[in-house]
Amino acid sequence: MATGRHFQLNTGHKIPALGLGTWQSAPNEVYEAVLTAIKAGYRHIDTAWIYGNEAEVGQAIKDSGIPRDELFVTTKLWGTSHRIPEKALDISLELLGLDYVDLYLIHWPVSMNEHGNDPRFPSLPDGSRDLDKDWDFVKTWEIMQKLPATGKTRAIGVSNFSTVNLEKLLTAPTTKVVPAVNQVELHPYLPQHKLFKYTKEKGIHMTAYSPLGSTNAPLQKEAVVQAIAAKLKKTAPQILISWGISRGTSVLPKSVTAERIISNFEDVVLDEADIAAIDLIYKTTNKRIVAPNWGIEVFHDNEE
């Protein structure tokens, strides 16, 4: 059984340390995945408009029978809606069948043309991204700050923000609210020590996506991870999830396989020596897995 750990956000609300990620979970699979997760004890579900599965996620939440106030639900604002975050949130809430989400994130610090040739990934004739160059995430955040007062979200935050973009956001004269969360790719191949230190100093909680590296990633086969798993009689994913939580980050392992969803919920409290050993993995293998070409620089920090 999972430890049931939580972390406190700068809003005063608590975020469960372990959640279910739903990126790349097809609509016909994600319903069963979310239902299985909630029945197994998960109380933190992460989705996004761009995933195309909010309706199925919401249906599973409804069918689980668990009271809404016992769940923590996150969704995200896509780049083509940076000028209209409240309207975009209304669409997500309707799809989810919810009155509010617990956390609403700017998905990427990239504003795209709302009226481009595609609602998801608008492109220019040369194939490059059709960016909204008269807008930026600082202006989006200025509007986002008004959303908690509407009751449609309890907290707001960002995703895929570097120290450079966070500094730009936090020092903007229009910024009155510090993001509650920065959700980024985090795992032993990409521990992001610089970003982690920065967010901690600013009171921003970090949430890790792709905490297992990726499906069948070599990270799970690392000798250090395998040795700790064997010693504790746990699986490699359980060790990687536990490492992420031990750092003070919430983690979002993704799976649509019932057995793995249930297994991933069984985290363990690692000792300092094991944490330190996993901390060193990036010294020999250092890589980012999720790196879309946006046409502008997004990842400013050293990949460590």
Image (cartoon, rainbow, N blue to C red):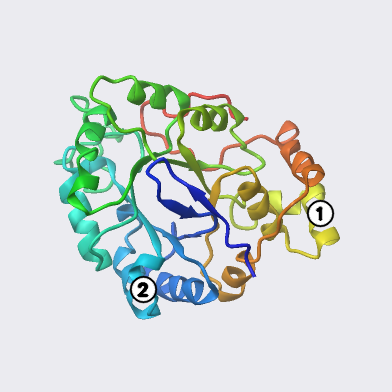
Vertical arrangement, residue 53 with respect to residue 183, above or below: below
> Which residue is depicted at the point 48% across and 38% down?
291
| Count of numbered labels shown in the rendering | 2
Q: Is residue 286 left or right of residue 295?
A: right
Vertical arrangement, residue 76 with respect to residue 70, above or below: above
Graded by Cα atoms within 10 Å as few (under 14), some (14 to 19) or many (20 or more), the crowding at tag 1 reads some
Q: Is residue 95 left or right of residue 218?
A: left
Vertical arrangement, residue 47 with respect to residue 109, above or below: below
> Which residue is depicted at the point 59% across and 72% down?
262
Amino acid found under the numbered disc labelled 1 = Ile
Viewer can see residue 217: no
Vertical arrangement, residue 145 with respect to residue 67, above or below: above
> Which residue is depicted at the point 84% across and 54% down?
227
Q: Secondary structure at mark 2?
A: loop
Amino acid found under the numbered disc labelled 2 = Pro
Residue under label 2, please give it.
Answer: 67
The label on residue 52 is none
Residue 189 picture location, percent across and down: 66, 40
Q: Quadrant of the N terminus?
A: bottom right
Marks 2 and 1, how far apart at CA: 37 Å
Q: In front: 154, or 299?
A: 154
Q: Quadrant of the C terminus?
A: top right
Residue 238 picture location, percent across and down: 68, 60
Residue 142 picture location, percent across and down: 22, 32
> Which residue is depicted at the point 36% across and 29% down?
295
Residue under label 1, please give it.
Answer: 228
Residue 159 picture location, percent across and down: 40, 40
